[in-house]
Image (tube, grey):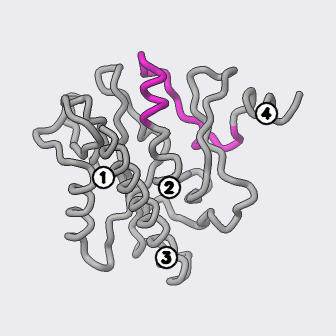
Amino acid sequence: MDETQQMETDLPENPDLAWDLDDFNNRQRAMDFVMQFEHTLCVYSPSVQQLYTNYNMYFPKELQRKMVILPDPTAFHDTFFYIDTRAVVATGLYIIPGELIDKTGLFLSNVAEDRSLGNRQIPFEAGMRAIMKNRPHDDPFLPVLAKGDLRSFEQSWPVMHLHRVKPKVLAEISDLDRNQLGNVIEEKLESLFIEQQKASAFL
């Protein structure tokens, strides 16, 4: 068995890196949606307290209802260690596809307890920039993903819940690492803004 075949049949040892796609009637739509974030949002693993900034997403043929996240093993410096679970919190904010509300691009929304969309949906970049601008300097808004954040809405639309990192809670890493972590997350988010702008230009 070659390396590619092995990758297609094995789940990662870290269960946080194998995401379920069971809830989606339209698996391809979920795959296309989540791939937008492969190089633009970092992924957190609570079981090992690590944050991955450089990874690839795979959809193994042998595991049709799974998405596997594989950090780049050659980019050790792109993983942040000792990221306490208390420093990564749910935000209640969701990235939703514009098609869900008869628009194009990505939008920010909240989702009510009954799994319905909240009362307000804001264009993704404008909403994120407004949130980031209004945060205190010592508590920036640094969005990341974790297992369970890719969710289905009405079983056919994928939506992405956001967690965020609270740097001032990270007592076990240096100030330098805290600053670097924040910079990397913000740089990746900017690249997502750029990708969305490019996509809009072709519509």
Quarter-of-image position of residue 169: bottom left
**Three-letter residue code for mark 2:** Cys
> Which numbered disc flags the more N-terminal residue, 4 or 1?
4
In this rendering, the label closer to the viewer, 2 or 1: 2
Mark closest to the chain's N terminus, 3 or 4? 4
- Judged from the image, the secondary structure of the residue bearing numbered disc 2 is strand
Mark 4 to mark 1 CA distance (whole Å): 36 Å
Which residues are drawn in magenta? 12-33
What percent of the width, then of the height, locates residue 164? Answer: 38, 58
The extreme right residue here reads 1
Whether residue 108 is situated above or below residue 68 in the rendered picture = below
**Which residue in the structure is indicated by mark 2?**
42
Does the magenta segment cover residue 27? yes
Q: Residue at x 38, y 57 (%)?
A: 143
Instruction: Name the residue tied to disc 4.
Output: 4
Which of labels 3 and 2 is toward the front?
2
Residue at disc 3, secondary structure = helix
* C-alpha span from label 3 to label 2: 15 Å
User: Residue at the spot x=26%, y=50% of the render?
Assistant: 124
Residue reaching furthest to the top: 25
Q: Nearer the viewer, residue 195 or 69?
A: 195
Q: Residues within 10 Å of mark 3 (few under 14, many from 20)?
A: some
Task: List the residue tagged with mark 3.
Answer: 178
Q: Earlier in the sequence, mark 1 or mark 3?
A: 1
Residue nearest the observer in this picture, 64 or 201: 201
Measure the C-alpha gap from mark 3 to mark 4: 36 Å
Q: On the image, numbered disc 1 is attached to which residue?
A: 91
